[in-house]
Structures are given as C-alpha cells and as structure tokens.
Image: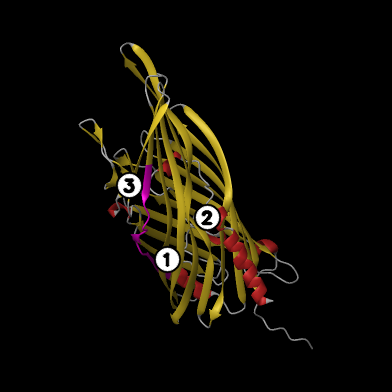
Amino acid sequence: MKKRLFLGILQVAISLLSVAQVSSTLSPYSQFGMGVLSDQSQGFNHGMNGLAIGMRDGKIVNVLNPASYSAVDSLTMIFDVGVTGQLTNFKEGGRSLNAKTANFDYAVAAFRLLPKVGFSFGVIPFSNIGYNYYAASYNDVNTSSYYYNETYDGNGGFSQAFVGIGWEVLKGLSVGANVSYFWGKYDKTVTIASSDSYVKTLTKNYSTSINSYKFDFGVQYQHPVGKNDLLTVGATLGLGHQLGSDALLVATTYDNQLNTSETTRDSVPDAFKLPLTLGFGASLMHNSRLTVGVDYTLHKWGSIDYPMQGAKTAGHELGYQLVSGQLRDRHKLTVGTDWIPNPMGRKFLSHVHYRLGASYATPYYNINGVKGPRELSVSAGFGIPLANSWNNRSVLNVSAQWVNMSADNLIRENTFRINIGLTFNERWFAKWKVD
C-alpha cells in the first residue's frame, strides 16, 4: 500500500513536468535575461512572501533550504501542491492595460528516510517568459511620412525537478542538498515592418533549449535562547555553472516588392550560465505561537555574459555574441511572520496560521544600458487546518500577494496574485494494533 501511494505521488509530480513549463506571466520584462524569476515558494510561506532560509518545521516542505528536511518525523508523509492566479495592470504614460493568467505552481513531497534523515522530491518553477506587444515609430523620408511597426512576442520558461536530502549531523545542526534536473526553452521573435511597400520586412527569431543540472546546498542550526524562544539560523549555496546550451538566431528579410526572402542563421555556443547564489536567514519562534524571520539572498548574475547582437559600428550590425554588462547582481531582502493564536486550544480558529510578509529585490538585468525595474512586494495569508476523524494535520494554505515592478521612464507593473496550496500531511508509517 505504501509503495503504491508513493509511486502514485511520484507519477503525479512527473505528469506535471510539461505543465510546469507553461508561462505564468505576460510581462514585457520577461524578454530579458532568463525571464521573470520565480520566488519558489510553497503553501506555508507564500503568505510570508517566500521567507524560508531560517524556517524549520516537520510539517512543511521547505525546498529553499534542504537542511530543513531532517525535521520531518518518522510517521509523516507530506505532499504539497499549489496553483496561482494573477491579474496584472501595465501602465506607460497615460495608457493602462490589464491581463490575467493562471497556472500550476509547484508539487513537492517529503518523508523520513532514515533516523535524522529526511528525503524530498518535486517540481518547482525557476523562471517564466511570456509577452506580446508592439511599438510604432515614424519617419519622414523625401517628405513622405511612413511608420515602422515593431512587434515583440515570446514564450517559454525554465523549471526544476529535484530530489533532496537533509541530515541532522549533530543535535540542532543539519545539512542538506538538492540535486535538480534543470530544463526549459524560450522562443522570442522580433518583427520590424513598415507601411512603405518599398521597405523590407525583417524578422528575428531567438531560441534555445536547455537540459542540464542544478546543485543547491543548505545548513541550519536551531537552539533555544530562552524558556519560550527557539532560534533557527540558516544559510544556502547554489552553485553557478555553464548550462552547455547554444543560443540560436534566425533572421529573415522579406522583400515586399519582389516577394522573395533571405534567411541567415547564427548561434552562440555555451551561451547560458546559472549564477552563484548565496542566502542567509534567521527565524525566532516564541512560545510555539509567533514566528518572525528575515532572509537575504544574493544572485551573482553580474559576472555572466548574455547572448545578443552587438551595437552597430560604421553602419554594420555586429554578429550574435556574448556581451558583458547586460546582467547585474540581484539582491533580495524578505521579512515575514507566522502567528497561531493557540496551538493547544480547542477552538478551530485558534489553530489557523495567520501570515504576513514583504520583500524588496533589485533587478538582475539592464535595459538599454540602465537598471531594469526594482521589485517591491507584500503578502498575507492563512493556513487553515483540515480536520476530520482520521486526519488533523493537513492544511489548506490561501494567500494574496501584491507585486510592484517599476523603473524610471519604463513600464510600471502592478500584479495581484492569489495562491492556493494544499498540504497533505498523513501518518503513513504508523503501526496499527487490533485487539
């Protein structure tokens, strides 16, 4: 029975691999770098805006710090799945536009493998790419006015399917690691057309497909700091490495008068790389009711070159190549809190988790030589216990998040998200005795 249930959950996670690649964004900013980065939150920390590095609890699957897996007890099997819906408002000048999307968010699981050793597996997103917009510009040649219409379209994204392990090597001290299959693709197209039939139409298609790996490590130390207070500190490390995939560019020029086309192809070998990532976090739990925490993460994108066409020199456009200075280091600071009125109380509302969180993140790419948009976000949520005659440990997690992305003289985005996650927490490995 245990084997069938385990294989069933594994099959569900694998079946969601293709769904995980469906883009959950319509942001024009997703055309830069590797797209809009996911915060990789689960149900328990969506309401805390992704707070995770110093969070440790045997009733959750904390993917962002694999050292936390060792907290899962010997009677527990956790399966957590979530979906997200969002509404985004785009503003530029005096114009405004709304767009909405919904998608599968994540599927993760965890259980005790050996004494003091926890095991986890699942599927989580890394980034999303999805946009479609156009820009018009006007010229005046020989007193005859005409316009250029530039259309930008793109879709894709990158995901991780991982297995992880956490081990409590000493009392209070745990280490862990996630090993991920990292995969995804994008397809970006730029079309430049003109109202003048004498002007040629140019279409550029940028694409790639990546199949690689990803390694992430974590450590946590938990220690009482008073009669009723428990402090947990943590750190994470994500290894940066070459992804080994080529960036492809296919350019097609169409002659509107002669009804002919010319196609050129160019590529950049080993064009993509994951950055070195460092994270530090801490949380303080008071009286098993109130938890407050803070995280800081650094993504070293600034040392990575990015494939693009070089600037024009003497009227000639340089070839497709790796260019430095397009990406920049990303810093992110998150604070959050989780409050349970009375874990030992008899009233239903005394067992509900009430969560709040906020984050600030700097951009990881430049746009036309200047900083991209900063990101400011706040969230709130609930963890609602699902109690019945045979299970009182599963939780329905519901949260709302507001995200603002803005930069001087660029498009402003305001996104409102609803996240719904269901954490199945079952006592699979208990031995029952019948008298």
Classify residue 229 as left or right of residue 85.
left
Membership of 247 in magenta stretch: yes
Q: What residue do we see at 50% from left, 69% from top?
A: 163
At label 1, the amino acid type is Ala
Residue at disc 2, secondary structure: strand
Q: How far apart are marks 2 and 3 (CA)?
A: 39 Å
- The residue wearing badge 2 is 356
Q: Residues within 10 Å of mark 2 (few under 14, many from 20)?
A: many
Image location of residue 50, percent across then percent down: 48, 57
Residue at disc 1, secondary structure: strand
Q: Residues within 10 Å of mark 1 (few under 14, many from 20)?
A: many
Whether residue 17 is visible to the viewer of this picture, yes or no, is: yes
Q: Nearer the viewer, mark 1 or mark 3?
A: 3
Classify residue 57 as left or right of residue 34.
right
Looking at the image, tell me whether mark 1 or mark 2 is earlier in sequence order.
1
In this rendering, the answer to whether 148 lies above or below 383 is: above
Image location of residue 17, percent across then percent down: 55, 58
Q: In which quarter of the image is residue 187?
A: top left
Q: How crowded is mark 3: few (under 14 residues within 10 Å), some or many (20 or more)?
A: many
At label 2, the amino acid type is Leu
Q: What residue do we see at 64% from left, 76% from top?
A: 3
Q: Which of marks 2 and 3 is in front?
A: 3
- The residue wearing badge 1 is 282
Image location of residue 6, percent across then percent down: 62, 72
At label 3, the amino acid type is Pro
Q: What is the quadrant of the N terminus in the image?
A: bottom right
Q: What residue do we see at 57% from left, 43% from top?
A: 101
Q: Give the range drawn in magenta.
A: 233-249
Looking at the image, tell me whether mark 2 or mark 3 is earlier in sequence order.
3
Q: What is the quadrant of the C terminus in the image?
A: bottom right
Q: Residue 307 carries which label?
A: 3
